[in-house]
Amino acid sequence: MNGQEAKRDAGKLQISLVPTQIIKEIARVRMYGNAKYHDPDNWREVEPQRYIDALLRHTLEFVRNPYSVDDESKLYHLSHMSCNVAFLCEMLLADYQGLQTTYDTPYSCKHCMEHLVADWSFCPECGAPTEFYKENNQ
């Protein structure tokens, strides 16, 4: 058995599929925010609606000009959009997934056994297309 056969990656997220530029853009916005607010975690204290509003403001500027730059930060509006979406994913999806573990559904992913909502098209844990089954043969 060679080293590749011994490693079991089935069902794990393939992080290498994520384009790296978005990570760099989020980092730029985070570095700007950290310099401005002097607290790398202060974003967690803001209500999600404020990030939704900021996302929409930056989106309007991006639609007007895809290469437009935010007046205050001098960073692209697209970069701010990416960061706002990242914050919302962290805040809202983490909350939602927390609810899923509290209120388990009877559906699980066949690949990683993550609990699923029946109408999901892919598993949020492993990224596999949903092939779910109802637990306890119900």
Image: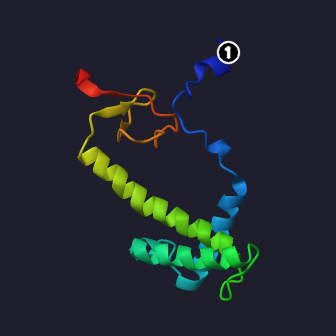
The chosen color scheme is rainbow
Q: Quadrant of residue 65?
A: bottom right
- Residue at the far top in the pictured view: 1
- Percent x, y of residue 24: 69, 63
On the picture, is 127 further left or further right than 14? left
121 on left or right of 103: right
Judge whether 105 appears above or below 2 on screen: below
**Relative horizontal placement of residue 111, taking residue 65 as reference (left or right):** left
Q: Is 123 above or below relative to 2?
A: below
Extreme residue toward the bottom, this view: 72
In which quadrant of the rendered image does the N terminus lie? top right
Which residue is label 1 attached to?
Answer: 2
Look at 58% across and 85% down and name the residue there.
Answer: 36
Residue found at x 49% / y 78%: 53
Quadrant where the image shows the C terminus: top left
Which of the 4 image quarters holds residue 8? top right
Along the line of sight, the residue nearer the viewer: 55 or 97:
55
Residue 50 spot, x, y in % from top left: 44, 78
- Residue type beneath disc 1: Asn
Q: Count up the numbered dots.
A: 1
| Image position, residue 137 (x, y; %) | 25, 21
| Residue 63 image-quadrant placement | bottom right
Judge by depth and name the residue closer to the eye, 81 or 87.
81
Determine the secondary structure under disc 1: loop
